[in-house]
Amino acid sequence: MSNESLANLLKEERRFAPPAGLAAEANVTAAAYEQAKADRLGFWAAQARRLSWDTEPTQTLDWSNPPFAKWFADGKLNVAYNCVDRHVENGLGDRVALHFEGEPGDTRSITYAELQREVSRAANALTELGVQAGDRVAIYLPMIPEAVIAMLACARIGAPHSVVFGGFSADALATRIKDADARVVITADGGYRRGKPSPLKPAVDEALGRPGTENVRSVLVVRRTGQEDVAWTEGRDVWWHDLVGRQSDQHTPQAFDAEHPLFILYTSGTTGKPKGILHTSGGYLTQTSYTHHAVFDLKPETDVFWCTADVGWVTGHSYIVYGPLSNGATEVLYEGTPDTPHQGRWWEIVQKYGVTILYTAPTAIRAAMKWGDDIPAGFDLSSLRILGSVGEPINPEAWVWYREHIGAGRTPVVDTWWQTETGSMMITPLPGVTETKPGSAQVPLPGIAATVVDDEGHEVPNGSGGYLVLTEPWPSMLRTIWGDDKRYIDTYWSRFQDRYFAGDGAKKDEDGDIWLLGRVDDVMLVSGHNISTTEVESALVSHPRVAEAAVVGATDPQTTQAICAFVILRGTAADAAGDEADEAGLVEELRAHVGKQLGPIAKPKRILPVAELPKTRSGKIMRRLLRDVAENRALGDVTTLTDSSVMDLIQAKLPAAS
Ligand code: WT7
């Protein structure tokens, strides 16, 4: 990346102060930044004391062998006890932990006392299957209560879980089972997706036919959809309701070392085999618990929290399971898609349960924008008091729409930057403290040290761009890549000395606030200028006719790269057939609009209206494939796409491109 100018083009002047009432009652105030600055390790030691320890730690950080960190190393605790039992012991057994809403409309509310019994039964069942502390358990489930129960049962007996997203294929599942050498798989006959049962068990059967998965001795199967024809391997497969159902609901949790592995979660790199990100117990729980308390200002007696992520992603691990439950929260767990059976389903759920805090992703917000303002307007969303965003940079227009149409123009929006690797939130406003700026994650949390550096690793001045780095270890950091310490060092700790390289481009504005600009592979070089795909996309989305945009740099003989934009238009038929003359006029208008917003250098050379964009199952746009299209190449690997037919439609729009 050249030093010259990394995309410092977008000017966003809107500001939103915290509501006075919220600020006055906030769990965390500006003083936390001061405390953490004065004594960072003391600050984290204090946050660790929010948990219950069997042996209180006397050490905070051991960084004697960087980049391998140990946090609270001489402490011992049980993570599941912290998320369940201690609330029951504190007299909160009757509080609802989970309001489960199945896609077909079936519901189940589970109190902390019930959760304690369910987790105990499941822990006893895993023990009966021979699972011991340290054994890995793969979990491949839909978004049903058993997913949460299974994760907590593993944590309770010290068996690291490896949750594999239920939308992944048999191949992806097999790779992950093999890499972690899992001994048991927990799955279901299926789950409900887009109005119909979608089977899961066949993928497990297929995966277990692959070499390298022979060590799996048991498959525990939840009956969710009740399909009749579930293939069964006698001696290996066992129904959850049979085995778990007959266990005692009493189980004494054992304390484990703070550095005992809690889970492995795979993230797909752009190349190579997926990386098994390893998280451990005490530090991970300290930071997920603290950030959930601080960033969502959780008042567990009155709030109803809802994180719409899947438990198969880190967001679900940290902000459906470990963060909220460690804080004794009441939360919603929803199985299905946002538009089944109608496009107001989420808003109906907010109204039904009186959700006060909503945490979702920009892709979902942009989909809701596209479906129309009148849909959320048809529901009572007045219970909401804080809105969160995560997963990719949120375009200022989507941020403002979220606040206006979901938050009635009154709720703070917290844009939280973090990664599977960081385990918990790292850079985000605090709702009772920070004056927010649409599109910016703004400030590192108390106790977190982040900055932006140039190619040589020098911190950039305010107003400049570069690479996001984390300059001090943090409690919920990944400990390594499972089985591959060298890859851990190479991927994260080699680009800049003594600093964690996040892989994201970022800039600091004149106030020193941080703006995330997307993965560094997504920064374009146009006539010597570094321009971020995110900023051009935001400029496009700020035009009233554009619902979504994806921008890539295509190799260009004159300008090194040329900006090529794919846009979904608002208010046109789904096939985007449209009137061609109208389309040509609009494309010119959009180019001019971007030029006006960002400057002539950022004007896309080509703009292609399309019906859909290629997205991964976690909602991220796969720019790599769009680059293949823009450069007239054969498409690369499409197996992680939600819907690979999207690419056929896009290529059809592009007759032998110039
Ligand atoms: C990457 C991590 C964190 C849980 C979900 C994704 C991007 C994430 C933001 C944000 C800008 C963001 C980054 C990051 N990202 N949150 N608020 N603003 N970018 O976890 O799959 O590990 O992805 O997501 O590029 O590196 P993940």
Image (cartoon, grey):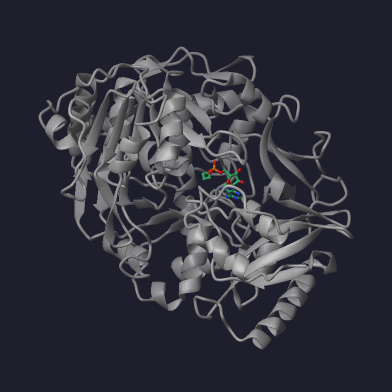
Q: Residue at x 60, y 57 (%)?
A: 436
Q: Position of residue 147 (x, y in %)?
A: 30, 40
Q: Position of residue 217 (x, y in %)?
A: 28, 23
Figure check: 282 above or below 566? above
Q: Is residue 137 left or right of residue 94?
A: right
Task: Name the one closer to the observer, 249 or 412.
Answer: 249
The answer to which quarter of the image holds residue 131 is: top left
Q: Is residue 92 left or right of residue 211?
A: left
Q: How many marks?
A: 0
Q: Quadrant of the C terminus?
A: bottom right
Q: Is residue 535 visible?
A: no
Q: Position of residue 292 (x, y in %)?
A: 44, 42
Q: Is residue 309 visible?
A: yes
Figure check: 218 above or below 288? above
Q: Residue at x 39, y 61 (%)?
A: 384
Q: Quadrant of the N terminus?
A: top right
